[in-house]
Amino acid sequence: MRVSTAVLLLASTVQAHYRFSKLVLNGTPEATEWTTIRQTKNYQSNFGVTDVAAADMRCFQNRAGTGTASVAAGSVLGFVANAQVSHFGPVQFYMAKVPDEGADVDSWEAAGNVWFKVGSISAVQGGNGGNGVALGSGTETWPAYKKSIVDFTIPTAVPTGTYLVRVESIALHQAQNVGGAQIYLSCAQVNITHGGKGTPGPLVAFPGAYKSTDPGLRWSYYPVVTSYTAPGPAVWTG
């Protein structure tokens, strides 16, 4: 049987996409998908979000949450990319605290200015980039590229409580034009124990934190890029 080039291209394109569907707790990935991560709309097709003004930029969820993980502040929290982070670009992490009263973590929408950034795995701009040196589109520039697990350290100053933890991978391979970036994201439900007394911020909203014209959502193959800053607020470290 002869398979058309178009079919092969479509298959390879779909395979190249990915989803974040398992947490890594204490170094061990969860056994099954969507245990403590809200199932996303790409649970079968792995497509990304391209409209940064859409409500899907919040958690991209297909259904409400079903479980909550428990982890101590100061611990490393990871996410498994089911087919590797197979597009270059930054990977970032945000948290939003569920209100202590009157909110159910399984159904809380995290709307409004409730999100703060806690991690960003962005472009390496030392020897390979910056100072007029061209940035590349490979692993030498993008530390998260080709990784199956991406992680961050929960700040020790994060107050104890229940949070949504949002991971996003911003794929820049088709971002030469406005709207070309693809965002692969999901939200985990996590109970933080042994927290601190910090005041996280700045707080931003999804959608709202990004504009389609943000420089961090664009990529130029020519002229070559010599510096890159990921979109969104600064990382809060406590």
Image (cartoon, rainbow, N blue to C red):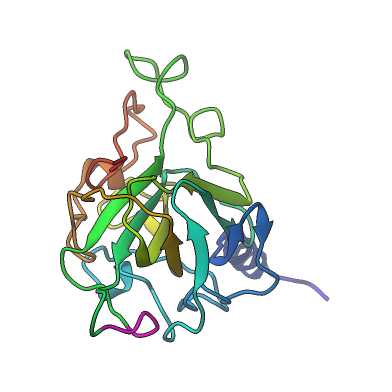
Residue 168 in view of the camera: yes
Residue pictured at 64% horizontal, 59% vertical: 83
Q: Would you say 138 lies left or right of 181 here?
A: right
Q: Quadrant of residue 130?
A: top left
Q: Is residue 102 magenta?
A: no
Q: Position of residue 34 (x, y in %)?
A: 56, 76
Q: Quadrant of the C terminus?
A: top left
Eyeballing the image, is 71 above or below 73?
below
Residue pictured at 40% horizontal, 62% vertical: 165
Eyeballing the image, is 153 above or below 22?
above
Number of residue marks: 0
Magenta span: 103-107
Q: Position of residue 129 (x, y in %)?
A: 41, 20
Q: Quadrant of residue 29?
A: bottom right
Q: Position of residue 182 (x, y in %)?
A: 39, 58
Eyeballing the image, is 190 above or below 233?
below
Residue pictured at 34% horizontal, 40% vertical: 219
Q: Position of residue 43 (x, y in %)?
A: 54, 77
Q: Quadrant of the N terminus?
A: bottom right
Q: Main secondary structure of the magenta part?
A: loop
Q: Is residue 105 magenta?
A: yes
Residue 184 in view of the camera: no
Nearest the camera: 217 or 166? 166
